Amino acid sequence: MRLVNTKINSKLNPTIKPILDTKRRALLSVMMTASVSALLLPVKAIAAIWNKAAFEATQLNQAQKDLGISDELPSQEIEIIAPDRAENGAIVQVEIKSRIPQTEAIAIFVDKNPTALIGNYMFTNGALPQIITRIKMADTSDIKIVVKAGDKYYTNTKNVVVLENGCG
C-alpha cells in the first residue's frame, strides 16, 4: 500500500505540489494572523481601561486628581521597603505591603520624576495586597504610596536619596 501511494504521489507531484504548497502557505498565514489577533484582543481591552491622563501627569497633585484620589489619611499599615540611599536611580527596588483590610488598589508616586505616577495596581477579593517592583527615580524624592480600601484613601511615604540620576 505504501508503494502505491508513493507511485501516485510521484505521478501527481510535479503538477500538484506547487499548488498545494501555495495553498498551505496561505492557510498558515491566515492561521497565524488569526492567532496573533486573538492574543492581542486582551491587550486592547486592558489599554481601554488604562488611565492615560494620570500616567502622563507631570505633577503629583494632578496625577492623584486624575485617579480620583482625595482626602488621604496617613497610615502606618502601609509598609514601604526601599533603600534609604539608592546608588543608581535607574533601578530602585520597592516593596509595598498593605495591612489595611479590603485593599482594592495601590498607587506608587514619585514627585520629582518626569511623570509622577509610577504604577497603579488593582487587587481582587482575596488577593494579597503586596507589590515588589523596580522603579526609576530622577532625583532624591519621597516615594508616596496611596492605598484605596472601600471609599477611603490611605497614604504613607518614604524618602529615598538618589546618588546617581536614573531618568536622564
Image (cartoon, helix red, strand yellow):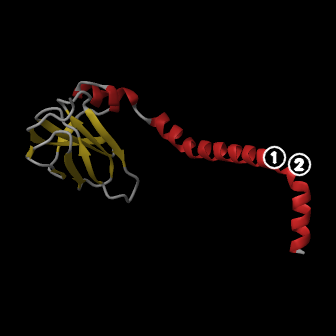
Q: Position of residue 36 (x, y in %)?
A: 59, 44
Instruction: Identify the element where label 2 is drawn.
Output: helix
Residue 113 falls in image quadrant:
top left
Task: Please tell me how crowded label 1 is: few (under 14), some (14-19), or many (20+) other residues with Cα within 10 Å.
Answer: few
Residue at point 20%, 39% (across, down): 90
Considering the image in quadrants, where does the N terminus appear? bottom right
Q: Looking at the image, is 1 positioned above or below residue 71?
A: below
Q: Label 2 crowding class (10 Å Cα cut-off): few <14, some 14-19, many 20+?
A: few
Whether residues under marks 2 and 1 lie with C-beta atoms below 8 angstroms apart, the answer is yes
- As shown in the figure, which amino acid type bears the numbered disc 1? Pro
Which is more toward the observer, 118 or 10? 10
Where is residue 159 drawn, in percent x and y? Answer: 10, 40
From the image, tell me which residue sits under label 2. 15
The foreground one among 107 and 132 is 132
- The quadrant the C terminus occupies is top left
Say which mark, if any, is on residue 18.
1
Across and down, in percent, residue 18 comes to 81, 46
Q: Is residue 100 above or below residue 106?
A: below
